[in-house]
Amino acid sequence: MSDLSREHLASQLAEAVAEALREDLGRQERALLVVSGGSTPKPFFTALSRAELPWERVDVTLADERWVAEDAADSNARLVRETLLRGPAEAANFVPLTSDAATPEQGVAEVAERVMALSWPASVVILGMGGDGHTASLFPDSQELGLALSTAEPLVAVRTPSQPQPRITLSADRLHQARRHFLHLSGEDKRSVLGRALAGDDVRELPIRAFLACPLAIYWAP
């Protein structure tokens, strides 16, 4: 039953995102979709990949990424290529957040230039949330959290003690620059964390709070 409700939620979210992209493509040449990685979005990506859209006019990028090779098992880019950029959606223009540089600190300028060339403001940003309240790579224990929450730069290189790999993330400012924000969650544990986040205002404790003040469509299943 839980799996069925998650599949149903993924289909509903895919319909909402596809409609948002259609709406924006009706008045502009290109539309930008910003997605998140992890296990939760897999059924959503699969459902969205089947949507009837002029995908050749859609740009897709990530909210954040591990600084790993694109074919690594835990690469968000690999996940997007294997589950979203299939069928009709294969025609979309995908812009990953990594480069050939050895570290995200060395590569951030090149990736930022690539990202800034996209069709901002984004039509849609899909956020996820971890059990620690992080979203994108805005982690509570990251020494770069303050920078990522305050900078006007589009991207921040991130080192986080709780995570094995260095990362790169869109800044909170850049993530805010979207017409629509969706939060995609599953599981009772995530609902409990979201409840805590809604009950307080310390963004450094639970970084998802940085997005609770803007219009946010929450898609949750058990």
Image: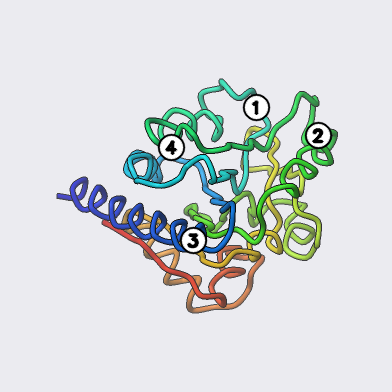
For this rendering, which residue is in front, 78 or 40? 78
Residue identifier under label 3: 26
Q: Which mark is residue 68?
A: 1
Dot 3 amino acid type: Gly
**Vertically, is 174 above or below 212?**
above
Q: Which mark is residue 82?
A: none
Q: Which mark is residue 107?
A: 2
Q: Which mark is residue 89?
A: 4
Gap in angstroms between the C-alphas marked 2 and 1:
12 Å
Gap in angstroms between the C-alphas marked 1 and 4:
24 Å
Dot 1 amino acid type: Val
> Which residue shows up at 52% across the image and 38% down it?
92
To which quarter of the image does residue 87 belong?
Answer: top left
Q: Earlier in the sequence, mark 2 or mark 1?
A: 1
Report if the CB atoms under discs 1 and 3 are less than 8 Å apart.
Answer: no
**Vertically, is 92 above or below 126?**
above
> Which residue shows up at 80% across the image and 25% down it?
102
**Disc 2: CA contacts within 10 A as few (<14), some (14-19) or many (>=20):** some
Judged by depth in the image, the label closer to the viewer, 3 or 4, is 3
Visual colour scheme: rainbow
Gap in angstroms between the C-alphas marked 3 and 2:
35 Å
**Vertically, is 121 above or below 143?**
below
Report if the CB atoms under discs 4 and 2 are less than 8 Å apart.
Answer: no
Judged by depth in the image, the label closer to the viewer, 2 or 1, is 2
Q: Earlier in the sequence, mark 4 or mark 2?
A: 4
To which quarter of the image does residue 157 belong?
Answer: top right
Gap in angstroms between the C-alphas marked 3 and 4:
18 Å
Find residue 4 and report its horizontal and vertical position in percent: 18, 48
Gap in angstroms between the C-alphas marked 1 and 3:
37 Å
Q: Earlier in the sequence, mark 1 or mark 3?
A: 3
Quadrant where the C terminus is found in the figure: bottom left
